[in-house]
Amino acid sequence: MHASHPHPAPDAAAPPARGRDLLRTTADHALGVLHPVVVAARGLGRLASAVRRRWARTPRERRGPVLFAVTACLLALWLTPYGPLLGAVALAGAVVWQGRDRASDAADGGPGEAERARLQTLYEALVPHLSLPGDPRPQPLYAHDGDWRRAFTDFAFTAEGRLARLRLRYPPHFGDGDPEARARLQGLLCAKAGRGREYHFAWDEELGELTLTALAPLPTGICAQRFVTAPGETVLGFTDLHTVQRTVPVVEDGGERLDVPPVVWRTGPRSTEPHLLALGHPGSGTTTLLRSVALQSLRQGEVLVVDGGGAGEYACLAGRGRVLAVESTLAGALSSLEWVVRETERRLLAANRARQTGRDVPEEICRPLWVLVDRPSVLSHLARSEGQRDPQDLLQVPLRYGRAVRVTVALADQFEGAGSLSEAVRAYTRARVVLGAATPQEVRAVLGEAPATTPPPDVPPGRGYARLGSGPVHRLQVPAAPDPYDEESAESQRRAVLELLPEPVAAAGRRPVR
């Protein structure tokens, strides 16, 4: 026999459900009735806590004057017509504002529970770095189990809940003038704000505030092209919009038109940084930078290229119009640079005679001459091994006097050969570029100042930093200008470089260099 199980009636569970609904309705009604009381109680409690914290932070010698001032204000308010009524209204408004539901504020754009937990975690991580052992103040700015609202004055989060911006106050005893102390604090903030992004740090020593901003990656799909620039201007690359005052229209690799902020290097008689030095590790893009500079300078003047690496990276320029020579041997480099010395001196003499007689400077003197030297340390090593003159010694004349007659020198080398650079090269190249995965110490050694941004997680070719003279350090992304004869490069980028090259000229029509 099978035991029969009685089936419950269809409405057997109905009374408990109706009971729960009745209880929920009653609770909601009670909360609706008591909501103003809850808000008022919560607001009074928060106001009382704020007054107590403020009174505890007030020094003992100032408590008497503060109490006297508050009493005088209350007495004046009491004697003023409608003063008690206005005071009661103001107090009620403050109570309601303090007692508001913070969860609803989070839904309207304020910090939610997850954001508040993230801010509290970041605050607790900063306590060991910004707190002072034995601080005599009753409530220091940074303390364990402290309130992050006193330290973080502004913040913003992305749609994914990651920190996008944070402004924090730091105590006066923090050594904001010490680069190592800054680096430690910046490293901690980067780790807690989320790795895999770049951050910009703005220090305000006067107010004692530090602003952290998450930066978007720089565009890497911009190829070499005809940039909209004035005569004497060269686009080294592209940077952040908040660091420069202009933008230029460009076309990305996919055909999209953008307006991006450039790092513009100005040359000529009025330039304060007429010569350029770029350093980087192998494959960082220093040769690409010089090739991009050559393609832009061919629109305005003549170019002489000395390739110390000897890898044929500038073979696309050989035999082109307005390209005087492309030398990759020691003998050719010495001969070409000797001609540059004589040409610089000739221009100086011609310009001096024209000014003495009151005539205009000849047009050929005003035509820019660009001397691009890649890997000069290799040429110096070869010259020493063969007992010949160092090619860098021949660069002293154009480096010192070339600005007045529009002779511009741009050099590129690797960090391994930076110690072989001559004093003239170090002294007169005030436009500096660092490319590749360089450490903050290497960047500071070249640019004279550490960058205000963190390095990217993945460094693409042509990515680095630039500084013009004594200006700020910019993030930099060099436009893609590969060797058009390199079959491993993208076809669109190779085609873009070929379109910028001048037409080939016959060997008999070229200007002799030697």
Image: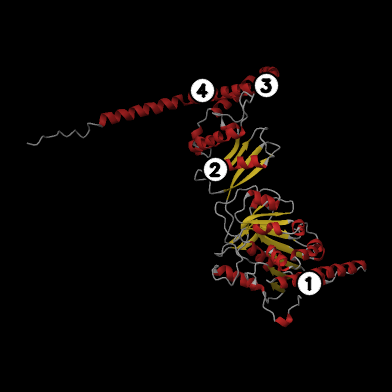
Report the disc number at residue 339: 1
Q: Nearer the viewer, residue 131 or 440?
A: 440
CA neighbours of label 2 inside 10 A, class few (<14), some (14 to 19), many (20+): few
User: Which amino acid, mark 4?
Assistant: Ala
Contact (Cβ within 8 Å) of mark 2 with mark 1: no
Residue named by callout 4 = 41
Mark 4 or mark 2, which is nearer the start of the sequence? 4
Q: CA distance from mark 1 to mark 3?
A: 76 Å
Reading the image, the residue beneath label 3 is 59
| Of residues 118 and 70, the one drawn nearer to the viewer in this rendering | 118
Give the mark toward the camera: 2 or 1.
1
Above or below: residue 295 compared with residue 56: below
What color scheme is it? secondary structure
Q: Residues within 10 Å of mark 4 (few under 14, many from 20)?
A: some
| Marks 2, 3: nearer the viewer | 2
Label located before the other in sequence (2 or 3): 3
Quadrant housing residue 9 = top left
* Front disc: 2 or 4: 2
Distance from label 3 to label 4 (Cα)? Answer: 29 Å
For disc 1, the neighbor class at 10 Å (few under 14, some 14 to 19, many from 20) is: some
Q: CA distance from mark 2 to mark 4?
A: 40 Å
Q: Is residue 93 above or below residue 422?
A: above
Asked whether residue 326 is in view, the answer is yes
